[in-house]
Image (tube, helix red, strand yellow):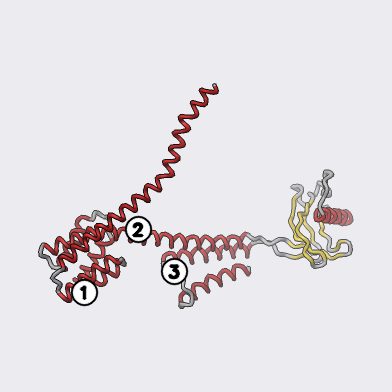
């Protein structure tokens, strides 16, 4: 019971400390992951508490105990044994059926350890005690043995505790899985932004050089994206469309471009947004040249990135190629060996 209270207090304390800012855990920032963690942990702890509360066990018999004999035959009961208040271990008590008489001890001549010898002696004492009782309906456990006081305890059922612990472990695993998924999504978003940057800048440069204003070029790119996206999400163009919506909603161009760079979160996009803001504030005549230079640098960066990805793909294919080589060698060599030795 105490374990469930401790687990509940621990989960509640962690959430409370994170909520008031005393504990900084990035894994709890995800709202959906946090709800899943709390749901699984608390539900598992509650279910484990109910199992523990309704389960039998933990009862201590200090004045002996009696077990009912059944017509179905012998059965076993496990007890924790204490001698003069000192726990000595556990043992299974074989309760004979009503028609089977007393339990039979079988040794088969095997040398017993000290603990097994003590248990055998105790079994014999229990059998002798029941011979004196001579009760066909009950099997008795004595309260004394060799002048020492005996206590018999039915072991507690640990299923509820294990269930609560496993639920907490599962909740942590779910939370960590959510964190990994978020990190993977951010990584893919970052890679997609870098790969789309050269094309975006090149398209924007062509539109500006054709005579469009910066705002009109943004609106043209956003409109083309909405028309040709076909349900495929491209984060860079999504942010361009968001910047256009902000400007239509009353946000100034400079602020919209600044937010565009911040949302993308890449140095390249922030540099691009700074160029746009400087063009608005200072009216740079070299805007086209700067954009063309930025576009060429972006294409060079993309080609370098493509080469790196190609090298990674080749490295990943190395192991399957080795496995295929081993299969081919086996196909060639095994028939040759069979023919030679046959």
In the rendered image, the vertical position of residue 5 relative to residue 323, given as above or below: below
Q: In the visual, does 221 lie left or right of 211?
A: right
Residue occupying image coordinates x 47% and y 62%? 176
In the rendered image, the vertical position of residue 14 relative to residue 169, given as above or below: below
Disc 1 is placed on an element classified as: helix
Residue 138 appears anywhere in the view: no
Q: In the visual, does 256 lie left or right of 206?
A: right
Position of residue 78 measured from the top left corner of the image (x, y, whole percent)? 74, 56
Position of residue 336 measured from the top left corner of the image (x, y, whole percent)? 49, 26
Residue linked to disc 1? 254
Tag shown at residue 188 = 2
Residue occupying image coordinates x 26% and y 71%? 259
Q: In the visual, does 8 lie left or right of 156?
A: left
Look at discs 3 and 1 and give the one toward the viewer: 1
Separation of residues labelled 3 and 1 (CA atoms)? 32 Å
Quadrant of the image occupied by residue 183:
bottom left
Quadrant of the image occupied by residue 265:
bottom left
Q: Is 256 or 309 nearer to us in this picture?
A: 309
Residue linked to disc 3? 26
Q: In the visual, does 107 lie left or right of 257?
A: right
Mark 2: few/some/many CA within 10 Å (<14, 14-19, 20+): few
Tell me the quarter of the image containing the C terminus.
Answer: top right
Disc 2 is placed on an element classified as: helix
Tag shown at residue 125 = none
Separation of residues labelled 1 and 2 (CA atoms)? 28 Å
Disc 3 is placed on an element classified as: helix
């Amino acid at each position: 019971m105490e374990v469930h209270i401790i687990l509940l207090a621990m989960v509640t304390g962690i959430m409370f400390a994170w909520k008031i800012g005393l504990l900084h855990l990035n894994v709890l920032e995800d709202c959906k992951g946090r709800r899943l963690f709390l749901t699984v942990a608390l539900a598992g702890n509650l279910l484990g508490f109910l199992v523990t509360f309704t389960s039998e066990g933990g009862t201590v018999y200090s004045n002996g105990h009696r077990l009912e004999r059944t017509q179905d035959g012998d059965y076993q009961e496990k007890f924790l044994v204490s001698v003069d208040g000192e726990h000595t271990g556990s043992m299974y008590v074989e309760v004979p059926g009503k028609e089977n008489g007393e339990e039979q001890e079988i040794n088969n001549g095997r040398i017993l350890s000290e603990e097994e010898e003590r248990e055998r002696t105790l079994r014999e004492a229990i059998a002798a005690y029941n011979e004196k009782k001579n009760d066909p309906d009950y099997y008795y456990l004595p309260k004394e043995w060799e002048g020492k006081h005996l206590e018999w305890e039915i072991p507690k059922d640990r299923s509820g505790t294990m269930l609560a612990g496993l639920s907490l472990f599962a909740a942590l695993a779910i939370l960590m899985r959510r964190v990994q998924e978020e990190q993977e999504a951010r990584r893919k978003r970052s890679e997609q932004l870098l790969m789309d940057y050269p094309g975006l800048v090149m398209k924007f440069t062509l539109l500006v050089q054709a005579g469009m204003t910066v705002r009109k070029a943004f609106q043209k790119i956003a409109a083309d994206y909405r028309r040709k996206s076909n349900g495929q999400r491209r984060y860079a163009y999504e942010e361009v469309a968001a910047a256009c919506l902000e400007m239509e909603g009353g946000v100034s161009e400079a602020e919209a471009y600044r937010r565009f760079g911040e949302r993308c979160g890449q140095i390249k996009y922030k540099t691009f947004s700074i160029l746009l803001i400087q063009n608005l504030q200072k009216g740079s005549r070299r805007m086209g040249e700067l954009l063309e230079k930025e576009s060429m640098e972006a294409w060079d960066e993309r080609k370098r990135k493509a080469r790196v990805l190609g090298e990674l793909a080749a490295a990943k294919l190395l192991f399957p190629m080795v496995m295929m080589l081993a299969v081919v060698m086996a196909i060639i060599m095994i028939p040759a060996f069979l023919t030679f030795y046959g």
